[in-house]
Image (spheres, grey):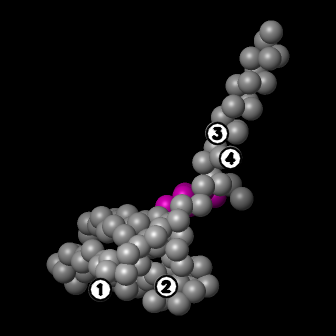
Amino acid sequence: MKKIIFTLALVVPTLYFAQDSQKDKKCDLPSTYQEPAPDKKIQSFLKKVDATTEDLRKHIAIDNDCDEKDIVFLRISEQKGNGIYDVCVKGKSMKYKRMGSVFMKNSENPFDTGK
């Protein structure tokens, strides 16, 4: 009985996270969609350290091997020190984050050094 419970305790979370990571969220935007406008005060502050939304657009284009025009911002939530961005890249929904002046995918952990 203990072996069954132990096996289930290992298998169920593994299956749950495996299904969660396989979700490919599609974003079908209407042709009249307009991107949200970022806060001008925050953008002028971030321009000093090259961390504006346009810099993020360039980062995403290089990261996903696509053109900058294929990237559409769905939601922008930012402050001077950090930010979270929902983005549509070639029809696929993705999330990016900014910590200071560094951009990364939302799933990446910058403090993970155990490689």
The nearer-to-camera label among 3 and 1 is 3
Residue at label 2?
70
Query: Which tag is nearer the camera, tag 2 or tag 4?
Result: 2
Instruction: Name the element at disc 3.
Output: helix
* Residues shaded magenta: 106-113
- Name which of mark 1 and mark 2 comes first in the sequence: 1
The answer to which quarter of the image holds residue 111 is bottom right
The numbered disc on residue 18 is: 4
- Where residue 16 is drawn, which disc sits there? 3
Q: What amino acid is labelled 3 in the image? A: Tyr
**Label 2 amino acid?**
Asp
Residue at horizontal 47 percent and vertical 64 percent from the top: 95
C-alpha span from label 4 to label 1: 39 Å
Q: Are marks 3 and 4 in contact (CB under 8 Å)?
A: yes
Task: Give the alpha-carbon distance from disc 1 to disc 2, as whole Å.
Answer: 23 Å
Q: Position of residue 79 (x, y in %)?
A: 26, 66
